[in-house]
Image: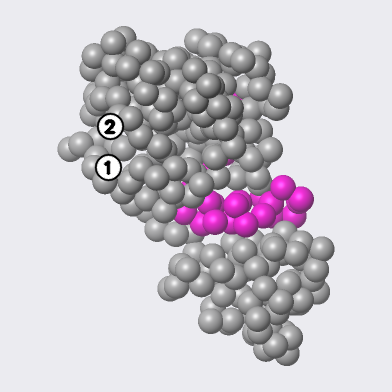
Amino acid sequence: MRNVNDRRRALGQHFLRDAAIARGIVDLVAPTTHDLVLEIGPGQGALTGELARRAGRVIALEVDRRLAAELRGRFESVEVIDADARTWDYGTLVAPPGGRVIVLGNLPYSVSKPILMSLVSARRAIGEMALMLQREVAERLAAPPGGKTYGSLSVLTQLYCDVRLALRVPPGAFRPPPQVESAVVHLRVLSAPRVEVPDERRFHTVVRAAFAQRRKTLGNALAGGLGLASDTVRRGLAAAGIDPGRRAETLTIHEFGQVVTRLS
């Protein structure tokens, strides 16, 4: 039991037990019999049962083999895969004819960011997502420019998705209750990035450099983070119509696109 318990603690597993909230999460994406739904971390099956009743095909990724075996016994129509959601290849998902690929999950809080980034990277295979996250992370994903919660995670998710904070979930909805509040974000993958990005890797690099030292002005943060001369950065920002004295959190995604173009 020690290995199982250690793994649960390491992954921050807290099992959803509130049926009304489970229905609310599934309602966000409204799966039909035409859709393929992938559930991440089904745990004790609060969402799984609802999905099995409504979706055409359900795949569940569960890292805990004991829980996976229990789920197979309870939900014969669900394909339960023993897998780590951090490394599973979401790009292999294929939408059924006339249907969507939908991803739902109560993501383990300690590893939610790498899972989220993997999902965004596989966006061409996914149409829609409803993900339970620690409230602070959910707020960062949906944050608009201008506040402390807006950062690289906001920009690099909203570049590819419409993101909204859909539900707040109290600790008492889980067993055991977490020490933090939770929230569900609803993401719709865009047909194309919100701004034209000729070099996505460069865009990501520039955005991360801009936010790496938030207390610095944009000009100084980019010069240090990208290893460029201050004069080069200032000229690039001026050409983009951006004041180098601004802070990264004040820039919109479109402004970041202009910055990347001038600094590439």
Q: Residues within 10 Å of mark 2 (few under 14, many from 20)?
A: many
In primary-sequence order, the first of circles 2 and 1 is: 2
Residue occupying image coordinates x 41% and y 30%: 63
Outermost residue to the left: 97
In the image, residue 79 sits, relative to residue 216, either above or below, namely above
Residue occupying image coordinates x 20% and y 36%: 96
Circle 2/circle 1 CB separation < 8 Å: yes
Q: CA distance from mark 2 to mark 1?
A: 9 Å
Residue 65's x, y, as percent? 37, 23
| Front tag of 2 and 1 | 1
Residue 93 shows which numbered tag? 1
Magenta range is 144-168
Which element type, helix, strand or loop, lies under badge 2?
strand
Residue 113's x, y, as percent? 55, 45
Is residue 179 visible from the viewing direction of this image? yes
Residue 108 shows which numbered tag? none
> Which residue is nearer to you in this view: 261 or 241?
261
Residue occupying image coordinates x 40% and y 58%: 192
